[in-house]
Image (cartoon, grey):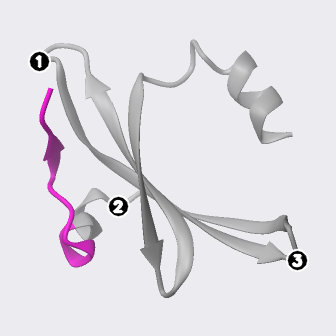
């Protein structure tokens, strides 16, 4: 379902770079969105995955770039 949405939402979302991390012991991904005007990849959101067995049961999204520092992540990725 998520992959299908991502294919159709290409024009809705900026280009991103993603970094695998852990949050409270759970798998997570930190996303950095491309700022088109500057070409910089800036902290954007963190998605935390909760699994039910081998299936994703829930994805909790934190669209709060200011929490990146709490995970030891930079506010910007090198180009």
- Residue range highlighted in magenta: 69-79
Residue 25, horizontal then vertical, whole percent: 51, 86
Q: Alpha-carbon distance for marks 2 and 1?
A: 21 Å
> Where residue 3 sits: x, y (%)?
76, 33
For label 1, the residue is: 38
**Around disc 2, counting alpha carbons within 10 Å, would you say few (fewer than 14), some (14 to 19), or many (20 or more)?**
few
Spatial CA span between label 1 and label 3: 42 Å
Q: Label 2: state its secondary structure.
A: loop
Give the residue drawn at x 43%, y 23%: 14
Q: Earlier in the sequence, mark 2 or mark 1?
A: 1
Dots 1, 3 in contact, CB < 8 A = no
Q: Nearer the viewer, residue 53 or 56?
A: 53
Q: Is residue 5 left or right of residue 38?
A: right
Determine whether label 2 and label 3 are within 8 Å by CB: no
Residue 41: name its quadrant: top left
Name the N-terminal-most of marks 2 and 3. Answer: 3
Residue toward you, 71 or 8:
71
Mark 2, residue position: 64
Q: Which residue is mark 3?
A: 53
Q: Is residue 35 above or below residue 32?
A: above
């Amino acid at each position: 379902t998520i992959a299908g949405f991502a294919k159709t939402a290409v024009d809705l979302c900026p280009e991103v770079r993603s970094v695998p991390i852990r949050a409270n012991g759970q798998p997570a991904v930190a996303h950095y969105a491309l700022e088109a005007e500057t070409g910089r990849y800036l902290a954007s959101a963190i998605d935390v995955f909760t699994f039910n067995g081998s299936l994703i049961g829930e994805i909790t999204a934190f669209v709060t770039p200011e929490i990146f520092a709490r995970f030891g992540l930079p506010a910007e990725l090198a180009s």
